[in-house]
Image (cartoon, rainbow, N blue to C red):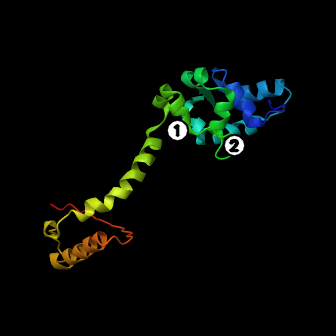
Amino acid sequence: MEKEKLTRNELVINHLMDGDPMTSHDIADKASGNGASMDVREVSGIMNKLNKSDLGHFIKKKRKGRAFEYKIVDDAAKNLTSEEAYGLSLKIGKDRYPLDQALEDYPNLAKHVKSAKKKKAASAKTKEKAPAKAESIPNEAVKVESAMGAAPVEDMLKELLKMVAGDKELNVNVEVTVRFEK
């Protein structure tokens, strides 16, 4: 059963799915022509939210004078349905269409996904392996030369390695200052 009335976000997404580059003013005019009165500021707010969602990977934003021109990439316009595009804009709910699922269904969309999304997944995997790498460092390999004296710093580093090897949860903040002198 199809919805009788579309939400404002769905209206904006439907107009974007045409594939034509449009400003917020253009989208507001088209939406008003369909019976929904939308203000340019409201469309701008919706576009800002859409750009921050998973759908934002497929929306190109370009400055045109004092406004922004929005265009959905051709691969997304050809492959995704309006319902799938709307699902990408959702964070939760039964209509949500996860980005991972979209990339699995349409592999050619992967080239438009920014690397930040891929790095998040990679960093989660490396967090689990980081303590194993720290354990493999031998205590003798740590040598520090400092103006304050190497012995206190070396002792602190040895204790740090012992804590990491002991599988204790560890939160380390390191501040380094480098000064070049002639």
- Rendered-image quadrant of the C terminus: bottom left
Quarter of the rendering containing residue 14: top right
Q: Circle 1 is placed at which residue position? A: 100
Up-down: is 181 above or below 152?
above
Count of numbered tags: 2
Residue drawn at (49%, 34%) of the image: 113
Query: Can residue 115 be seen from the camera position used here?
Result: yes
| Drawn side of residue 105 relative to residue 83, left or right | left
Up-down: is 97 above or below 149?
above
Q: Which mark is residue 37?
A: none
Pick whichever, 153 or 128, lies toward us. Answer: 128
Quarter of the rendering containing residue 97: top right
* Amino acid, disc 2: Lys
* Amino acid, disc 1: Asp
Q: Is mark 1 on a helix, strand or loop?
A: helix
Q: What element carries label 2?
A: loop
Q: Circle 2 is placed at which residue position? A: 94
Residue 25, position as x, y percentages in the image: 73, 29
Q: Distance between the residues labelled 2 and 1?
A: 16 Å
